[in-house]
């Protein structure tokens, strides 16, 4: 689907280890203060087909797609949790090598966990999702999301639903941004049950800050 990420890869094992230690290390000080509580408007939500490559990913990694409906659909964003989220976003972005699916696998679109230390945008986000789940975040609050980026191209991000609004983890920036400050147009995302996806119409972020 996309590429764009830092190319100074440090290897998948180091990236995972650094991400899981980020809460203790205190690395990264992106501020939690003044985050507006803005969620994707409910009026945009409707049924949508899952991305075919997502369906294939779920066939290979069933546990990564399993969502417990008893889990909360959003998290309370404490300073400790914020540090974990921003730290994992940063560590994965700097720990993986960006490569297109065509170069990597010889196919136009494949979603994977970047287990060999390389991947494109959705692989970055899927690894973040896995690490955040290992850190205790409910999968039900984390939504793989398809957008149109600032270049008019398809792109995948990870949306975290919180009491401070819908936040976006992206491989184009190590800043975790409110959805409406990314400059992206939002097309669809995972629904509450994981396998089902929902349409976001064309929810437009009015502030172009992505990739700056």
Image (tube, rainbow, N blue to C red):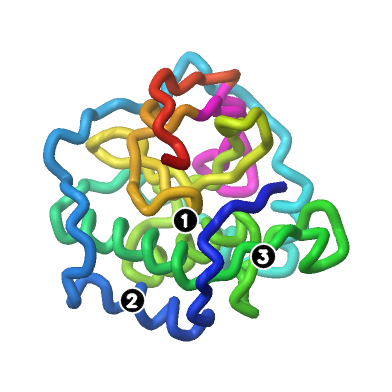
Do residues under tags 2 and 3 come within 8 Å of each other at their CB atoms? no
Category of crowding for the residue at label 2, using alpha-carbon neighbours closer than 10 angstroms: few (below 14), some (14–19), many (at least 20): some
Q: Could you say whether the residue bearing mark 3 is in a helix, strand or loop?
A: loop
Left or right for 103, reference 17: right
Between label 2 and label 1, give the one nearer the viewer: 2
Q: Quadrant of the C terminus?
A: top left
Q: Position of residue 73 (x, y in %)?
A: 37, 43
Q: Residue at x 58, y 33 (%)?
A: 149
Left or right: 164, with 192 as reference point: left
Q: Residue 1's spot in the image, x, y percent? A: 72, 47
Q: Which residue is mark 3?
A: 112
Q: State yes or no: residue 98 in magenta.
A: no
Residue at 24 percent across and 29 percent down: it is 37
Q: Is residue 194 magenta?
A: yes
Note whether 100 is above or below 51 in the view shown: below
* First-in-chain label (3 vs 1): 1
* Mark 1 element type: loop
- Callout 1 crowding tier (Cα within 10 Å): few <14, some 14–19, many ≥20: some
Front-most of residues 60 and 80: 80
Q: Residue at x 30, y 64 (%)?
A: 87
Task: Read off the residue under disc 2.
Answer: 20
User: Which residue is the extreme one toward the top?
Assistant: 43
Against 61, residue 192 (above or below) is above
| Res. 68 mark | 1
């Amino acid at each position: 689907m996309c590429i764009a990420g830092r190319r100074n890869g440090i290897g998948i094992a180091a990236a995972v280890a650094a991400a899981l230690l980020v809460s203790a290390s205190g690395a990264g000080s992106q501020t939690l203060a003044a985050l507006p509580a803005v969620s994707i408007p409910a009026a945009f939500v409707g049924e949508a087909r899952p991305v075919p490559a997502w369906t294939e990913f779920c066939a290979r990694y069933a546990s990564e797609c399993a969502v417990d409906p008893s889990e909360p659909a959003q998290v309370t964003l404490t300073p400790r949790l914020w540090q974990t989220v921003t730290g994992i976003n940063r560590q994965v972005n700097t720990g993986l090598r960006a490569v297109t699916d065509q170069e990597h696998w010889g196919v136009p679109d494949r979603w994977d966990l970047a287990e060999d230390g390389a991947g494109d945008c959705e692989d970055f986000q899927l690894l973040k999702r896995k690490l955040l789940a290992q850190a205790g975040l409910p999968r039900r609050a984390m939504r793989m999301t398809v957008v149109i980026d600032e270049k008019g191209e398809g792109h995948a991000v990870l949306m975290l639903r919180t009491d401070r609004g819908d936040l976006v983890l992206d491989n184009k920036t190590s800043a975790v941004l409110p959805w409406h400050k990314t400059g992206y147009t939002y097309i669809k995302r995972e629904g509450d049950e994981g396998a089902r996806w929902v349409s976001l119409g064309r929810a437009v972020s009015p502030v172009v800050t992505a990739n700056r």
